Image (cartoon, grey):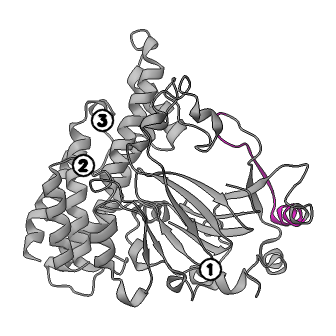
Amino acid sequence: MDRETRTFAERHYRDLGGRVPGCGGSAPSSVTFIQSPDAFSYADFVKGFLLPNLPCVFSSAFTESWGSRRRWVTSAGKPDFDYLLQKYGDVVVPVANCGVREYNSNPKEHMPFRDYISYWKEYIQGGCSSPRGCLYLKDWHLCRDSLVDDLEDIFTLPVYFSSDWLNEFWDVLNVDDYRFVYAGPRGTCWSVNICGRKKWLFFPPGQEEALRDCHGNLPYDVTAPELLDTRLYPRMQHSSLPLEVIQEAGEMIFVPSGWHHQVYNLDDTISINHNWVNGCNLAHMWRFLQQELQAVQQEVREWKDSMPDWHHHCQVIMKACTGINFEEFYHFLKVIAEKRLLVLRQGLKGDTGVSTGLGLGLQQAAFDVGRLADVLASVVAHPDFQRVDTSAFSPQPEELLQQLEDSVAAAEAL
């Protein structure tokens, strides 16, 4: 990030006045296609898509050097089962059954990768049918499982997504990540197609409210005929048609925060997917966590007066359902904040050899500190966070917030 882009981004958030951005005004009528890497900079992405929270598609030129596109795919553009079996055959992978619905999701099982490839071949030979249903390899943490010595053997992280706090946080803890491989046959439901084609249906933020049924639940399938039943879906008549995108092999899709989407595999497909958070969508994450806690509190409200430590139990339930609660969110902010504060302190001393480790420099660190300060201020003021036992936190939330605010003021000189 350069100084001009940082200034543009900071002005953007000042103009929002603390509001969480939606989709940058009225929803677009189509999704922008980015053709050439040489004509599209990080600043272009920040200003045109990341800040206004709009999706886009990057052409296959952005991923043509990836090892996975060379090694995982045959000359005919199909999955190279022989190579994949040789490389990963003994690995145990998570597989979802797309033909079975449980609580608005698909049940998962684990199996050796070679068994999944055997199933996939049988599915193709059976005319895209199998008595086992349609199985989809989903959420395979290939990088976390230390199956590659070098990520560049599989993919090179595009600069547009290199400010990635979520994986930066988990890499520090060395226990998890949000880099996934998805693979599956035709008909299954940041994403890059290594091979195959996908159809995406996008709904801008807020549009999902028109898709809810009479009980407030979102549909399992937005194309299901029962959505036409106004008794079940009374607000469906107010829904707009989704944005439709066909993602070809090698193409990369940016899915912004809050955009509900449904995806179909049109061919035998392998994709790499990368969930991430940074300063531009941190407020979205914080709003989501507040909504999740409210949903938990609503579900167990009848025990509020009779259950000791009811608020604590709500945080425990939230953690079980969402994977994170207010306490862990603070630790997430702390890990990123301490790294950015170190970079800024060294930079303000004139040590130009220090970087964020992200390849984006001091201006990115200064921007990040500003976003951290804004969100942490909201966290510290939240009544439910004030009920969290922070006595063992180091630094204390108020102390960390003061450090961030002091650094924001000092960074004006950069």
- Relative image position of residue 401 (x, y in whole percent): 19, 51
Name the residue carrying label 2.
376
Residue 246 versus residue 371 in the image, above or below? below
For the residue pair 390 and 302, the one nearer the viewer reads as: 302
Q: Quadrant of residue 267?
A: bottom right
Which mark, by number, is residue 385? 3
Q: Which is nearer the N-term, disc 1 or disc 3?
A: 1
Residue 370 versus residue 70 in the image, above or below? above
Secondary structure state at the residue bearing disc 3 = helix
For the residue pair 361 and 234, the one nearer the viewer reads as: 234
Q: Quadrant of the N terminus?
A: bottom left
Which mark, by number, is residue 82? none
- Relative image position of residue 388 (x, y in whole percent): 33, 33
Q: Residue at x 17, y 78 (%)?
A: 3
Badge 1 amino acid: Ile
Q: Is residue 164 visible?
A: yes
Name the residue carrying label 1.
154
Q: Residues within 10 Å of mark 2 (few under 14, many from 20)?
A: many
Q: Is residue 326 visible?
A: no
| Left or right: 332 as drawn, with respect to 266 | left
Asked if the stretch drawn in magenta spans residue 83, the answer is no
Badge 2 amino acid: Leu
Distance between mark 2 and mark 3 Cα atoms: 11 Å
Badge 3 amino acid: Phe
Query: How many marks on residues?
Result: 3
Q: Residue at x 14, y 63 (%)?
A: 11
| Left or right: 124 as drawn, with respect to 60 | right
- Magenta region, residue range: 103-121
